[in-house]
Amino acid sequence: MSDRLAVLPQYLLPKQAITVLAGKLAGLEAGGLTTRVIDWFVRRYGVNMDEAANPDTRSYASFNEFFTRPLRAGARPLAAADFISPVDGAISQFGPIVSDQVFQAKGHGYTTTALVGGDRALGAQFDNGSFATLYLSPRDYHRIHMPCDGRLTRMIYVPGALFSVNPTTARGVPGLFARNERVVCVFDSAHGPFVLVLVGATIVGSMATVWHGVVNPPRLAAVREWRYDDREIVLKQGDEMGRFLLGSTVVMLFPRPRLKFNPAWAPEGAIRMGEAMGTVGAA
């Protein structure tokens, strides 16, 4: 079956209603039932609870609390690199931005401007730069960390669809990551500006940042922006910056000069937060 046919049912499903219901269920505190659901999830997806700060599944009051669990100290050492992976997960795609085109999958791409919600001036800063798209599966650790030191300047909520973001859907839905609901976080760094985009998906109940808290819900009908010119929000490399409630995808855009990516990286390869992602290339 082709990828386009495989994703056809997603066009017909009431994705927002399913996502709202999933969010409510994941927030329930149901005692022993919650523990049984968590234990089933751990077995089903092979979650490594030995890495968790608290490995006792009975101690989590809700599925959301379990899903956003922190790791124990020292579980993710930081590599000595200009940029580190901000998440655990798998590499979807990475590489150069060609003019303003970001590669999604064979035959599919989207523009930098579309990804950041239509702001051409912002998107143009990353033309001919570099990108990385990283997929978080259900089994992964779901907190998001800083790839380098950065000062937050803007956050933009962009409403959109709620397609799944798994590899099959990335191959079958044109412009997927610039089509789904997302939160665009804009930073300044010693290497220039960069954006870190949290992309929503089916049953992703919400996305949150450490400076704002939960960004969605509510799910707004129009783009909304927050500016932080009057606040000094500075995060160090490896600091937590946000989290997903259920799995999703992170997309990062970097300006020229293009990054020299870790030579061990390859599409579909597994990654861990803190490993080397790349270094600043020559101008």
Image: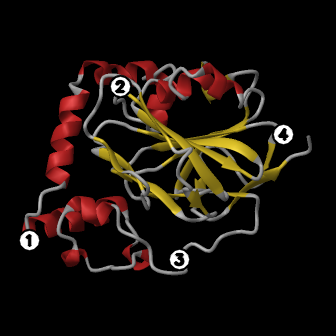
Residue annotated with mark 2:
161
Q: Which numbered disc flags the more N-terminal residue, 1 or 2?
A: 1
Q: Which numbered disc flags the more N-terminal residue, 3 or 4?
A: 3
**As drawn, is 97 to the left or to the right of 207?**
right
**As drawn, is 66 to the left or to the right of 239?**
left
Q: Which numbered disc flags the more N-terminal residue, 3 or 2?
A: 3
Q: Position of residue 197 (x, y in %)?
A: 52, 40
**Quadrant in which residue 253 is drawn:** top right
Up the image or down, 50 lies above or below 61; here it is: below
Residue annotated with mark 1:
32
Q: Residues within 10 Å of mark 2 (few under 14, many from 20)?
A: some
**Quadrant in which residue 58 is drawn:** bottom left
Q: Nearer the viewer, mark 3 or mark 4?
A: 4
Q: Residues within 10 Å of mark 4 (few under 14, many from 20)?
A: some
x 15%, y 47%: residue: 24
Q: Which numbered disc flags the more N-terminal residue, 4 or 2?
A: 2
Residue annotated with mark 4:
257
Query: What is the C-alpha distance between the residues marked 4 and 1?
Result: 53 Å
**Quadrant of image for the N terminus:** top left
Residue annotated with mark 3:
75
Q: Residues within 10 Å of mark 3 (few under 14, many from 20)?
A: few
The answer to whether marks 4 and 1 mark residues whose Cβ atoms lie closer than 8 Å is no
Q: Which numbered disc flags the more N-terminal residue, 4 or 1?
A: 1
Amino acid beneath label 4: Pro
The answer to whether marks 3 and 1 mark residues whose Cβ atoms lie closer than 8 Å is no
Q: Which of the pair 89/160 is nearer the observer? A: 160
Secondary structure at badge 1 equals helix
Amino acid beneath label 2: Ala
**Quadrant of image for the C terminus:** top right
Q: Position of residue 18 (x, y in %)?
A: 19, 35
The answer to whether marks 3 and 2 mark residues whose Cβ atoms lie closer than 8 Å is no
Amino acid beneath label 3: Ala
